[in-house]
Image (cartoon, helix red, strand yellow):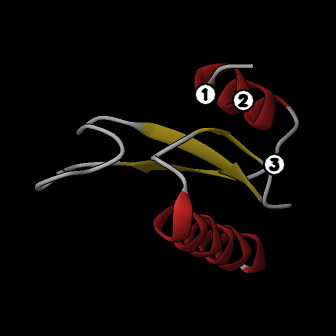
Amino acid sequence: MGIWSTITGSLAAREYCAMVSVIEARGSAPRDTGARMVVLADGSFTGTIGGGALEWQAIASAQAAIAKAEAN
């Protein structure tokens, strides 16, 4: 499933999701500017921003943002 299908499915289910985007890449980077992923509340995701520690940090930040939105 692609990122846009994931977003559409999340919205249809009235669930939160977060999009993570690479807005700038400097030097050697695993993905170029514009790479995206969509994270769901349970930590599952579609797409990638390159893997590794940065991606896991992005997933954790996205989950925190979703939890904050759900609490409001």
Q: Which residue is mark 2?
A: 6
Considering only vertical position in the picture, is 63 above or below 4? below
- How far separated are the C-alphas under marks 3 and 1? 15 Å
Residue shown at 61% from the left, 43% from the top = 38
Depth check: give the residue in front, 5 or 48.
Answer: 48
Helix, strand, or loop for circle 1? helix
Q: Please report whichever mark, 3 or 1, sits nearer to the chain's N-terminal start.
A: 1
Circle nearer the viewer, 3 or 2:
2
Which amino acid is tagged 3?
A: Glu
Which image quarter: residue 11? top right
- How far separated are the C-alphas under marks 3 and 2? 11 Å
The percent position of residue 49, horizontal first and vertical second, equals 46, 46
Q: Please report whichever mark, 3 or 2, sits nearer to the chain's N-terminal start.
A: 2
Q: Which residue is mark 3?
A: 15
Which amino acid is tagged 2?
A: Thr
Circles 2 and 1 in contact, beta carbons < 8 Å: yes
Q: Which residue is mark 1?
A: 3
Horizontal relation, residue 29 to residue 35: left or right: left
Horizontal relation, residue 42 to residue 26: left or right: right
